[in-house]
Amino acid sequence: MEFIRSIVEHINYVASVALFIIGLYTVLTHSNLLKKVIGINIMETSIFLFFVSIGYVHDGSAPIINLGGDRVIYVNPLPSALILTGIVVAVSITAYSLSLIIKLYEAYGTIDLNEIMEIRGGRTNE
């Protein structure tokens, strides 16, 4: 019973690990480049969830508000700032990846990684 209660209390961490594993599985097992980009985005989202979960403080208030009490619990603003930066980087990586996929499609006529490697004369991972 204690194990289940512990999992329920830390469901955000369990969900972020599950999302990361799903994204990693998608990146490693699919040869379609769009599916790989989607897997990377799922992994990035799991990291964002993890950082938000770390930064959460029960009954915490924003550190910019001075409530005047001695026992005021403040929320650490650093995870939120890191998440905002991470979102900008994630969107940039996604846009760049999609533009590269468009160029690969124009050059090879496919977005399947195994087919592109066959066209280039390389080995496939099958």
Image (tube, helix red, strand yellow):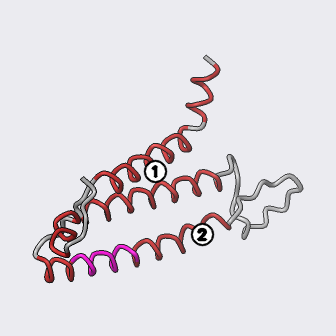
Q: Secondary structure at mark 2?
A: helix
Dot 2 amino acid type: Leu
Few, some or many residues within 10 Å of mark 1 (<14, 14–19, 20+): many
Q: Report the side of 100 relative to 15 (left or right).
A: left
Residue drawn at x 25%, y 64% as measured from the top left: 123
**Marks 2 and 1: which is nearer the front?**
1
Residue under circle 2?
82
Q: Is residue 95 above or below residue 74?
A: below
Q: Is residue 92 magenta?
A: no
Q: Is residue 122 above or below residue 47?
A: below
Magenta-tinted stretch = 93-101
Q: Secondary structure at mark 1?
A: helix
- Residue in front for this viewpoint, 115 or 64: 115
What x and y, as percent, mark residue 120?
Answer: 20, 76
What x and y, as percent, mark residue 27?
Answer: 35, 57
- Residue in front for this viewpoint, 16 or 75: 16
- N-terminal of the pair, mark 2 or mark 1, is 1
* Res 90 → quadrant: bottom left
